[in-house]
Amino acid sequence: MENQKELYFLHAEFCKFMANPKRIEILFLLGEKEMCVDEIASAMGVKVPNISQHLAVMREKGVVEARREGTKMHYSISNPKTLQACIIMREAMVEQMAKQFDMVRSIT
């Protein structure tokens, strides 16, 4: 039972990276291709230092990995299942929102 509680704790810690919309956007961008910080910042319209901070959190959680090429660091998703899980969560959210919308629409 204690091991199960530790697993729940680790699961929650891992999922914390998803509590930020910029990190979710980074995850989806990296789902398309490996990118360096400058490319991610440009695609998102955000400053490089901000992206670097988010990538540091994501690296710490093991969500992304980095590969050095010359002076640039290229980032990719460590495990494609992380993006799949994020997509499933988004689908569940959209379905729930549709149900709530239908419920409200049926009342009015």
Image (tube, rainbow, N blue to C red):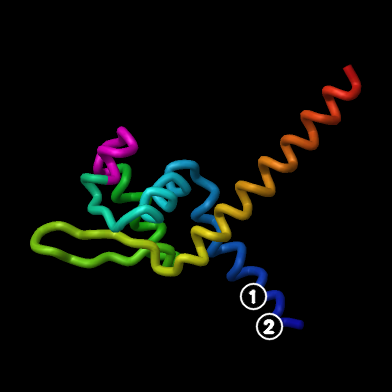
Q: Give the alpha-carbon distance from disc 1 to disc 2, as whole Å.
A: 6 Å
Q: Quadrant of the N terminus?
A: bottom right
Q: Amino acid at mark 1?
A: Leu
User: For numbered disc 2, what is the local secondary structure?
Assistant: helix
Is 15 placed above or below 78 here? above
Residue lying furthest left = 70
Residue at (31, 36) in percent of width and height: 46
What predominant SS class does the magenta segment belong to? helix
Q: Dot 1 surroundings within 10 Å: few (below 14), some, or many (20 or more)? A: few
- The residue carrying mark 1 is 7
Q: Quadrant of residue 6?
A: bottom right
Residue at (67, 70) in percent of width and height: 8
Q: Are discs 1 and 2 less than 8 Å apart at CB?
A: yes
Q: Dot 2 surroundings within 10 Å: few (below 14), some, or many (20 or more)? A: few
Q: Amino acid at mark 2?
A: Asn
Question: Observer-nearest residue: 23 or 91?
Answer: 91
Q: x and y percent of residue 91 in the render?
A: 64, 47
Q: Which residues are magenta?
A: 40-49
Q: x and y percent of residue 85 in the render?
A: 57, 60
Is 79 placed above or below 99 here? below
- Relative horizontal placement of residue 14, taking residue 9 as reference (left or right): left
Find out whether residue 42 is within the magenta segment.
yes
Residue lying furthest top = 108
Residue at (63, 69) in percent of width and height: 9
Find out whether residue 101 is within the magenta segment.
no
Q: Quadrant of residue 25?
A: top left
User: For numbered disc 1, what is the local secondary structure?
Assistant: helix
Q: x and y percent of residue 44 in the render?
A: 34, 37
On residue 3, the disc is 2
Q: Quadrant of the C terminus?
A: top right
